[in-house]
Image (cartoon, rainbow, N blue to C red):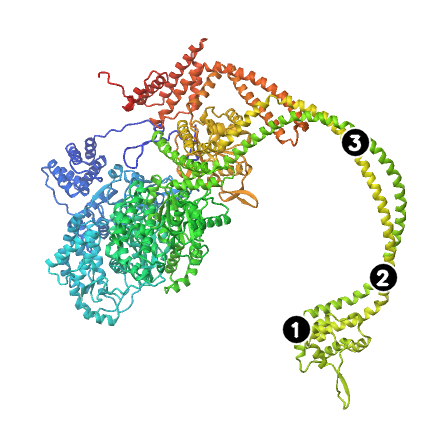
């Protein structure tokens, strides 16, 4: 072989290339090599070398003359140190440590050749080891060394220049040059000389960072001078990174998994740059972060003598001599010894510094005005700082642990805040420097008056800072102790301004007369001078609380002592650029106080950004989120827009999950900013991003319950601000204020009890938090203040004016408390306790009995009783019947508008849950966590509740490739709908849809803040800002991006109601609640218990009443309902027993119950129909057989009476025929006369028609004009006519029209004087006006005008008008609408007159012609009448003749038929004589079965729905129990009721067995379950029996076989669904792909009339013939309720009888193949023949029942019967022979039964080995192969019993040998013992009672034997 494949690449094999592996397994981060790899290498064991010898040789090589003695001393030092010093993670006394000492000694020898060798050795030992020792160990070490080197006096080493340079560096860095610290710096220097890899180890605050910074500065300052090591000093450059703030790939570089491209890492880039540098500068690579095996192991080659960085790209980078790897780490608890031994160690303890240097350095930096009071401050620090820290550590409990140095710095930072105004600045505003984090806005010079008052403020400022730093990390009890101690000390030291006696020191703020205020105007300054300095109660300046009537509950903030003081301290710290960490238990208002302060209480220059950490938050996510908000200032510098200042609020900071070795990358990233003000760019590799003008404020709860301890290296940067559990006084104030605001409109006597109610609420809450504690089974029993506020919020949902009495309030309070607290309780015990406690509170606090308050059970409230109302009123629902009807209407309505219909039974338990979900989602910020087993209705009820509230319900749809991108898109869609479109949404999410835990991370964010970081694109953000702008402006806020986005997220939180459904089973659930606390904190929990008995009964009643075929009386119906409930509870009990005895899980869920009812509904109708049809067919056949005998005698009588009638009919027909011949001649003559007259009449009619047409043509010319005129008139109304009449000076056109109409109507004109004197002329205007006086009449007269008789005089008068061009329609239209129509009418009448006149002669001619035509027609009619009479007579005769002929033929036919029927009847009676008795019995039996079928079918349905997962014994036990219960509940059933008896079809079962189904009863039952189950089946099939059976059974149907691992399994499934093929999904595990859900749930719907299903993203047609089978090879899988509700689990594990049968067949086939072949052939032919017989009988019965009338007439029936008779006789004969042959064969086969039995026993013995070790798994195929070998190799014998004995003995030994090869030695004896005992037990040689006693030492009481000796 010269080429080989390596990771997908073909590589040439070079013979000279060898692989060596070095390993020292057994510690962190290391794993053993797998044995199969180990076997390919030659092991070489390395011994611990002789250190002394190596040391001796090395020392000689360095020029030591006394090497032997020195080497002994060096190794002895290490040996004694390892034995006597304390065990620390960073101590290493191995070979590498020895080597370091030797090389250090060598260096010293070179520098000082003349120095005493022992002194050199001593100094080398000390230089290398002392830096790493703890103070206590150092004393011991010095003792060891002084014993080994007694005569040597140590000479102090002169570090001269270095020492002074270190001190200079300290003063430049403004730190104190503590001698021990300087000593540590020198030790660090010494270590850098001997080691290129070293670690600075030590707790937080020990000065590690400053140590290397000081040394770096000192060495750089000494550039060029000679060092103690004998080489010149060189400048030092540092490259700092936190290895845990990035991923391993980003640190070292990685290949892209998809493209295989190499991306460089940050470290490799930095090192490459260092190697490329040409200068001689020292380069220190600082890894400032936790060291753990995950990343540090890759540095081994860098840290040892190789000094090479090996990258996975194959690149190797050799480190230069100037490079040093430094690690700054708090501890090495998880580092491997390999790492520790490779590095030099410098250990720093906080003890070497103490706290004093911190204060001293700080005092040096005081602003000038304060510096004068330095001594006073120093005294105060001396008196209080360390004593109070000591007091704290001894007496107080901190919420989150702090460090002494941290508390000191916190205090210094807080005092500094008061000094801000005294920092000198010019009289100008200083703009924030782009690169600065510290510069603040400048101010005016400080006035002398102010300066004069500083002296009296030093003490109060100090004490205020002391209280809010040292005193602010503790809980409430601690505060009381701190208060007492501080007051005592202040009195002791005679402090001038003592705290007031009342309350605690925490209750007061310092009123320093605004002296420490940074921004004050001149007037205030003057006032400040006058104001007295005093302690004021925090609430003294608070204005009266006024809550607006329309305020939303979530927006109400009631200032309390806690919120006011926290807000104040937070403000002064943040305004002075200090980082703050708010700590406190959940629900103490941390997030609310911070977000309220950031959004409302800070200046405009502050831009807040919110982020929430969860268990899955990563460092990269965090970095992207922060980087995404910042702008680039200049190269490498990023920050907010100029003049602004970012404050990032991180909520739940300690939520990120710990990595394997305990690091939290997001925390490390934040720490990197805290320490170095930035982090590395992950895109521009190696570039450092400096972040300026940003600050962090964080909040976190105490560690525990999913929250992790945060490294002190981060928390040391923060000022702690503790939010303690709210004092009762604060709670009362908050909730009392809100309650009073709500209760304003209540009656006085009710609202006055507000204090008591609030007090009761608080007491209930407090009791619950102490009594109901979380346990593994109740991990969600975590209560916090949010829950109390939810109770009050719930009460506020009801309108106060609806409450009239105290009972109303208490009822509401009880209901809301139950909803918040009781609904999450998991069992009745807890619920009853809670109920009892509430009753007790009612009696004690209000003196009211529970029964008087809560009058209805269950107590329900809701707002859905008035459907479609705009103002939904939340109130108590007392009319439960009406409510059920309304909910049913909602459900019906839902089903009409959706494709996935819900068939729900709304029993009271379901209604309660609907009311609960409705209540949750009607509240803003209302989210629900519904806990319960799959199938308990969580999702269905949520959909219904959403529909009732008219909300959109959104659910994600999983597909094979559904991933984070699709999830984010779906989330975005929902959030934009809720936020931008302002739509109320319900986001329904189930734990079965969690494809990645990041889904929950995002959900956690939405629940917390209404946002998912970085989810929106820039375009989407723009649209959000645009949409929110008016809303923010209306609220009176500035439309900054922060405010706009905050308004948007607020709206999202308010409108988006997340409902998460989870199964509370298992560790995963508990882990998720821990990791994602918002699931509990931000959701109201509703626990779905098992359905109660009344629910089971009401569902059964509803289902059974809906079955039309049931027709059972009330008693039976009641029994059935009880049985359904009993079946469910029986299976539940047996499932627990199944788990206890067999360790097998089976879940009984409501879905199983619905499946029982569904299968029963389907089967009862089907079975009754089948039985009735069979009975009807058999009975009909029987009846017809009996009636045939009676018919024979009737037929004979009929034959005798028919003959004389036949003769008579023949004679009559001859006479009639002669009469017809004569009458035909007369008729023909009459017919010819009529025809002539008919022709003349037709000619006359044509002439008349021509005249009429001519006249009509003329008329048609005038008619259109007339019609148009009339239509025009119709469009006129009264007003148009009145308008004309009202004209005083009408236009000419109008006058002409009126004149024309008057002439046409013959109206007389009025004579009026003309133009010339004495002349008179006609005037028609007045008469015309008179005519128009009644418009309606006038218009009617025009319509009815007699147009046919217009006088000629009128026509001649009108002619001039017609000719006048002004009298046309268009001309008149210009002056009047009415006149236009009238003009049109006049012209039409004129035209009509002339046309009519021309037509008159033609009309006259038409009249004459018409009269003549009528005359002709009369003559024709008379002739026709005569002809009709003649023809009628002829027809009568013909009919008579036909009748005679018909009678004759009929009689002839009947006679022949009668004879034929007699013949057929004989055949029928003879053919079916044998069946008659059998059919009579069959009819009786079927009647009995039909009467008793109900119980049988219920039993069968229960078998199918529930018993699939159980083994045989359990099934039979349950069935027997149910049969007894059927009798108890009076449900009729047959005597031998069973699943197979009721549902199996022998022919079908036989075909299954031929296809490979084992013949035992259990397997046949499984087959029937598969056939009748409504869900697809999942087979538990460890031996592959089911797999084989399905493949054979469905082979002819083209079965598709797929696995979940197939890349295109969904496509194959899609094809099977589309084309209606069976599909087998093999080898599934315990999880099913979520993409299968639509198929498993059969979520089909109609589209365009055809059935379709949505699979993934595609909608595909659903073929009715599609079948789906699933198999698993797991012997005992644990399927969750969610999986088991979607499939029918069928346990196909082999049963002894089934295996025995198979083995018998195999044995006989081997020994007597002829017999087995014959047997198999017989089985197949018998099955075929019996099938044919059944078919023949069915065919005859069908023909008999289907034949109409008498069976004697059915020729086809008689033919079929003849053929069948012959065939069935033939088959019966064959069956008798075959059955005899089968008996003979079976007798011979049965002789081999001992072989089968023995082999079966051995198989189950081998199968049980998996209980000893899960590795011992043996397949059936393997076992059968060994069995076949056994038969083949066993000794032959003609004597059959001997042969059987030989086979058994040989096979038993063969199996034992084969199995033993795979067993551990310790298990072989056990296996032999098992084999022996099983065989002996079968042979009856072991007493079972003794056997039971042997392993378990247990005896049933009644079977205990008597003592032999008594």
Residue 1008 position, x and y percent, is: 35, 52
Q: Which mark is residue 1448?
A: 3
Residue 138 in sight from this viewpoint:
yes
Mark 2 or 3 closer to N-term?
Answer: 2
Mark 1 or 2 closer to N-term?
Answer: 2
Q: CA distance from mark 2 to mark 3?
A: 62 Å
Residue 1818 position, x and y percent, is: 40, 25
Task: Using the image, determine if residue 1864 lies above or below residue 1027.
Answer: above
Instruction: Determine whether label 2 and label 3 are within 8 Å by CB.
Output: no
Query: Which of the two discs, 2 and 3, sits closer to the camera?
Result: 3
Residue 1830 position, x and y percent, is: 42, 16
Mark 3 or 1 closer to N-term?
Answer: 1
Please give the name of the residue rendered at 83% of the width and 33% of the height, measured from the top-left corner: 1212
Neighbor class of circle 2 (other Cα within 10 Å; few <14, some 14-19, many 20+) is: some
Callout 2 secondary element:
helix
Task: Using the image, determine if residue 1849 lies above or below residue 369.
Answer: above
Neighbor class of circle 1 (other Cα within 10 Å; few <14, some 14-19, many 20+) is: some
Q: Which mark is residue 1278?
A: 1
Neighbor class of circle 3 (other Cα within 10 Å; few <14, some 14-19, many 20+) is: many
Image quadrant in which the N terminus is located? top left
Q: Which mark is residue 1761?
A: none
Task: Name the residue at the top extreme.
Answer: 1838
Residue 717 in sight from this viewpoint:
no
Query: Which of the two discs, 3 and 1, sits closer to the camera?
Result: 3
Q: Which residue is mark 2?
A: 1251
């Amino acid at each position: 072989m010269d080429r080989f494949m390596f990771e997908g690449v073909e590589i040439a094999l070079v013979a000279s290339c060898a692989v060596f592996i070095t390993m020292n397994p057994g510690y962190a981060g290391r794993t053993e090599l797998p044995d199969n790899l180990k076997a390919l290498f030659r092991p070489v064991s390395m011994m611990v070398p002789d250190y002394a010898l190596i040391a001796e040789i090395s020392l000689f090589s360095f020029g030591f003359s006394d090497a032997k003695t020195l080497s002994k001393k060096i190794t002895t030092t290490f040996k004694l140190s390892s034995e006597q010093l304390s065990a620390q993670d960073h101590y290493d006394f191995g070979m590498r440590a020895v080597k370091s000492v030797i090389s250090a000694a060598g260096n010293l020898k070179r520098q000082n050749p003349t120095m005493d060798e022992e002194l050199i050795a001593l100094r080398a030992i000390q230089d290398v080891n002392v830096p790493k020792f703890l103070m206590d160990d150092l004393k011991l070490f010095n003792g060891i060394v002084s014993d080994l080197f007694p005569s040597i006096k140590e000479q102090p080493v002169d570090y001269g220049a270095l020492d002074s340079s270190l001190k200079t560096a300290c003063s430049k860095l403004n730190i104190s040059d503590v001698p021990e610290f300087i000593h540590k710096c020198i030790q660090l220097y010494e270590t850098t000389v001997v080691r290129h890899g070293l670690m600075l180890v030590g707790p937080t605050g020990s000065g590690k960072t400053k140590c290397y910074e000081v040394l770096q500065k000192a060495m750089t300052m000494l550039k060029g001078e000679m060092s103690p090591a004998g080489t010149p000093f060189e400048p030092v450059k540092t490259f700092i990174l936190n290895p845990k703030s990035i991923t391993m790939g980003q640190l070292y570089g990685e290949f892209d998994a998809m493209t295989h491209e190499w991306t460089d890492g940050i470290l490799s880039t930095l090192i490459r740059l260092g190697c490329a540098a040409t200068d001689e500068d020292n380069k220190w690579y600082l890894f400032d972060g936790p060291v753990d095996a995950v990343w540090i192991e890759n540095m081994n080659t860098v840290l040892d003598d190789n000094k090479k960085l090996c990258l996975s790209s194959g690149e190797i980078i050799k480190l230069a001599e100037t490079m040093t790897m430094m690690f700054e780490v708090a501890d090495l608890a998880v580092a491997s010894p390999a790492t520790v031994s490779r590095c030099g160690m410098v250990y720093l303890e906080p003890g070497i510094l103490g706290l004093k240097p911190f204060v001293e350095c700080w005092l040096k930096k005081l602003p000038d005005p304060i510096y004068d009071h330095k001594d006073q401050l120093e005294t105060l620090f001396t008196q209080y700082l360390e004593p109070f820290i000591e007091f704290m550590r001894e007496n107080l409990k901190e919420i989150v642990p702090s460090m002494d140095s941290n508390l000191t710095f916190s205090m210094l930072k807080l005092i500094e805040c008061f000094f801000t105004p005294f920092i000198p600045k010019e009289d100008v505003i200083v703009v924030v420097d782009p690169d600065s984090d510290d510069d603040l806005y400048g101010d005016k010079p400080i006035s002398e008056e102010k300066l004069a008052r500083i002296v009296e403020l030093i003490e109060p400022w100090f004490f205020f800072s002391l209280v809010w730093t040292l005193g602010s990390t503790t809980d409430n009890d601690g505060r009381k102790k701190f208060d007492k101690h501080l007051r005592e000390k202040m009195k002791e030291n005679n402090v001038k301004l003592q705290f007031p006696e009342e309350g605690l020191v925490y209750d007061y703020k310092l009123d320093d007369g605004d002296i420490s205020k940074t921004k004050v105007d001149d007037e205030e300054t003057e006032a400040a001078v006058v104001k007295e300095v005093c302690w004021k109660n925090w609430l003294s300046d608070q204005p009266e609380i006024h809550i607006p009537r329309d305020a939303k509950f979530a927006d109400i903030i009631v200032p309390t002592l806690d919120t006011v003081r926290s807000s104040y301290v937070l403000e002064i710290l943040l305004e002075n650029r200090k980082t703050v960490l708010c700590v406190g238990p959940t629900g103490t208002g941390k997030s609310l106080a911070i977000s309220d302060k950031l959004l409302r209480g800070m200046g405009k220059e502050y831009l807040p950004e919110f982020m929430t950490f969860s268990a899955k938050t990563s460092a990269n996510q965090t970095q992207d989120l922060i980087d995404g908000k910042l702008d680039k200032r200049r190269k490498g510098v990023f920050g907010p827009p100029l003049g602004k200042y970012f404050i990032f609020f991180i909520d739940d900071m300690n939520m990120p999950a710990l990595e394997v070795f305990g690091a939290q990358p997001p925390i490390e990233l934040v720490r990197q900013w805290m320490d170095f003000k930035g982090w590395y760019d992950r895109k521009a590799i190696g570039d450092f991003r400096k972040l300026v003008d940003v600050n962090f404020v964080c909040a976190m709860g105490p560690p525990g319950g999913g929250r992790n301890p945060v490294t002190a290296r981060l928390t040391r940067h923060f000022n702690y601000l503790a939010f303690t559990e709210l004092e009762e006084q604060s709670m009362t104030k908050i909730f009392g204020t809100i309650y009073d605001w709500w209760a304003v409109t209540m009656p006085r006597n009710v609202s006055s009890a507000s204090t008591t109610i609030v007090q009761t609420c608080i007491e209930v809450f407090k009791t619950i938090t102490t009594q109901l504690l979380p346990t593994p089974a109740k991990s969600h029993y975590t209560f916090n203040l949010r829950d109390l506020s939810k109770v009050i919020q719930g009460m506020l949902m009801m309108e106060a004016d609806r409450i009239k009495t105290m009972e109303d309030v208490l009822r509401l309070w009880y209901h809301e408390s139950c909803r918040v607290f009781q609904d999450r309780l998991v069992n009745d015990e807890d619920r009853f306790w809670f109920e009892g406690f509430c009753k007790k509170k009612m009696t004690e606090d209000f003196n009211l009995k529970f029964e008087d308050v809560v009058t209805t059970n269950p107590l329900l409230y809701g707002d859905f009783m008035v459907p479609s109302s705009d103002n939904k009123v939340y109130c108590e629902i007392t009319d439960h019947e009406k409510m059920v009807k309304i909910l049913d209407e909602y459900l019906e309505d839902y089903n009409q508008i959706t494709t996935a219909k819900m068939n729900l039974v709304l029993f009271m338990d379901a209604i309660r849950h609907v009311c609960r979900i409705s209540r949750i989602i009607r509240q803003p910020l209302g989210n629900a966590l519904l806990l319960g087993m799959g199938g308990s209705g969580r999702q269905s009820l949520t959909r219904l509740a959403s529909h009732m509230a008219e909300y959109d319900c959104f659910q994600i749809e999983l597909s094979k490739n559904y991933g984070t991108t699709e999830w984010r898109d779906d989330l975005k869609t929902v959030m934009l709908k809720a936020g931008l479109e302002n739509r109320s949404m319900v986001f329904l999410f189930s734990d079965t849809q969690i494809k990645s835990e990041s889904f929950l991370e995002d959900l956690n964010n939405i629940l917390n803040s209404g946002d998912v970081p970085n989810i929106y694109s820039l375009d989407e953000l723009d649209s959000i800002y645009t949409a929110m702008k008016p809303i923010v402006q209306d609220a009176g806020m500035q439309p900054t991006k922060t405010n706009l986005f905050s308004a948007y997220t607020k709206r999202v939180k308010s409108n988006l109601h997340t409902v998460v459904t989870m199964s509370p089973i298992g560790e995963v659930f508990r882990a998720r609640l821990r990791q994602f606390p918002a699931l509990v904190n931000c959701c109201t929990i509703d626990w779905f218990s098992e359905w109660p008995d009344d629910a089971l009964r009401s569902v059964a009643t509803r289902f059974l009443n809906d079955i039309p075929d049931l027709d059972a009386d009330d008693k039976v119906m009641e029994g059935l309902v009880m049985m359904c409930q009993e079946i469910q509870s029986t299976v539940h009990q047996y499932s627990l027993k199944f788990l206890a005895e067999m360790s097998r899980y089976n879940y009984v869920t409501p879905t199983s119950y619905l499946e029982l009812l569904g299968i029963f509904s389907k089967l009862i109708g089907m079975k009754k129909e089948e039985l009735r049809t069979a009975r009807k067919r058999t009975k009909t056949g029987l009846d017809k057989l009996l009636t045939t005998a009676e018919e024979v005698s009737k037929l004979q009588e009929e034959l005798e009476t028919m003959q004389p009638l036949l003769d008579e009919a023949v004679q009559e027909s001859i006479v009639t025929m002669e009469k017809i011949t004569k009458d035909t001649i007369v008729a023909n003559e009459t017919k010819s006369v009529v025809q002539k007259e008919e022709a003349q009449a037709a000619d006359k009619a044509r002439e008349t028609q021509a005249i009429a047409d001519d006249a009509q043509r003329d008329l048609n010319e005038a008619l259109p004009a007339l019609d148009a005129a009339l239509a025009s008139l119709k469009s006129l109304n009264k007003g148009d006519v009145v308008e004309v009449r009202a004209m005083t000076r009408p236009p000419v056109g109008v006058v002409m029209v009126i004149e024309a109409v008057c002439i046409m109507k013959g109206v007389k004109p009025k004579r009026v004087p003309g133009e010339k004197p004495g002349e008179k002329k006609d005037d028609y205007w007045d008469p015309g006006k008179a005519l128009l006086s009644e418009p309606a009449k006038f218009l009617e007269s025009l319509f009815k005008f007699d147009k046919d008789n217009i006088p000629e005089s009128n026509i001649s008068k009108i002619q001039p008008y017609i000719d006048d061009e002004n009298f046309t329609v268009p001309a008149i239209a210009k002056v009047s609408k009415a006149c236009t129509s009238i003009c049109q009418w006049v012209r039409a009448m004129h035209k009509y007159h002339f046309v009519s006149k021309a037509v008159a002669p033609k009309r006259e001619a038409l009249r004459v012609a018409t009269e003549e035509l009528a005359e002709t027609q009369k003559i024709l009619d008379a002739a026709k009448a005569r002809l009709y009479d003649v023809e009628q007579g002829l027809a009568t005769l013909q009919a008579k003749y036909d009748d005679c002929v018909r009678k004759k033929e009929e009689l002839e036919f009947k006679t022949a038929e009668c004879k034929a029927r007699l013949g057929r009847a004989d055949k029928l009676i003879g053919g079916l004589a044998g069946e008659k008795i059998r059919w009579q019995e069959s009819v009786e039996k079927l009647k009995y079965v039909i009467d008793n079928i109900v119980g049988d079918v219920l039993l069968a349905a229960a078998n199918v729905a529930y018993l699939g997962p159980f083994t045989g014994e359990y099934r039979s036990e349950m069935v027997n129990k149910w049969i007894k219960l059927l009798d108890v509940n009076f449900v009729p059933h047959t005597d031998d009721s069973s699943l197979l008896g009721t549902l199996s079809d022998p022919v079908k079962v036989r075909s299954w067995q031929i296809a490979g189904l084992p013949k035992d009863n259990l397997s046949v039952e499984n087959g029937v379950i598969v056939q009748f189950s409504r869900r697809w089946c999942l087979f538990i099939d460890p031996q592959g029996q089911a797999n084989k059976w399905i493949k054979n059974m469905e082979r002819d149907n083209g079965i598709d076989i797929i696995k979940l691992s197939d890349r295109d399994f969904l496509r194959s499934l899609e094809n099977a669904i589309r084309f209606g093929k069976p599909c087998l999904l093999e080898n599934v595990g315990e999880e099913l792909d979520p993409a299968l859900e639509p198929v498993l749930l059969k979520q089909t719907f109609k589209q365009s009339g055809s059935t379709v299903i949505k699979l993934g993203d595609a909608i595909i047609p659903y073929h009715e013939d599609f079948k789906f089978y699933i198999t698993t090879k797991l012997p005992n899988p644990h399927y969750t309720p969610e999986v088991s509700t979607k499939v029918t689990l069928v346990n196909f594990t082999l049963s002894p009888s089934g295996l025995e049968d198979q083995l018998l067949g195999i044995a006989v086939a081997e020994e007597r193949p002829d017999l087995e072949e014959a047997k198999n052939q017989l089985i197949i032919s018998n099955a075929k023949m019996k099938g044919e017989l059944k078919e023949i009988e069915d065919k005859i019965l069908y023909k008999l029942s289907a034949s109409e009338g008498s069976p004697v007439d059915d020729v086809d029936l008689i033919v079929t019967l003849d053929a069948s008779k012959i065939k069935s006789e033939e088959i019966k004969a064959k069956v008798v022979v075959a059955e005899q042959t089968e008996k003979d064969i079976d007798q011979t086969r049965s002789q081999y039964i001992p072989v089968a039995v023995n082999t079966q026993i051995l198989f189950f013995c081998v199968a049980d080995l998996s209980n000893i070790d899960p590795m011992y798994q043996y397949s059936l195929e393997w076992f059968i192969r060994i069995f076949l070998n056994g038969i083949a190799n066993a000794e032959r014998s003609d004597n059959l019993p001997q042969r059987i004995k030989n086979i058994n003995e040989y096979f038993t030994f063969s199996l034992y040998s084969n199995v033993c090869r795979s067993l551990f030695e310790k298990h072989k004896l056990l296996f032999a013992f098992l084999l022996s005992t099983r065989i002996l037990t079968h042979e009856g040689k072991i007493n079972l009672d003794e056997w039971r006693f042997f392993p378990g030492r247990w005896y049933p009481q009644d079977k205990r034997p008597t003592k032999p000796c008594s």
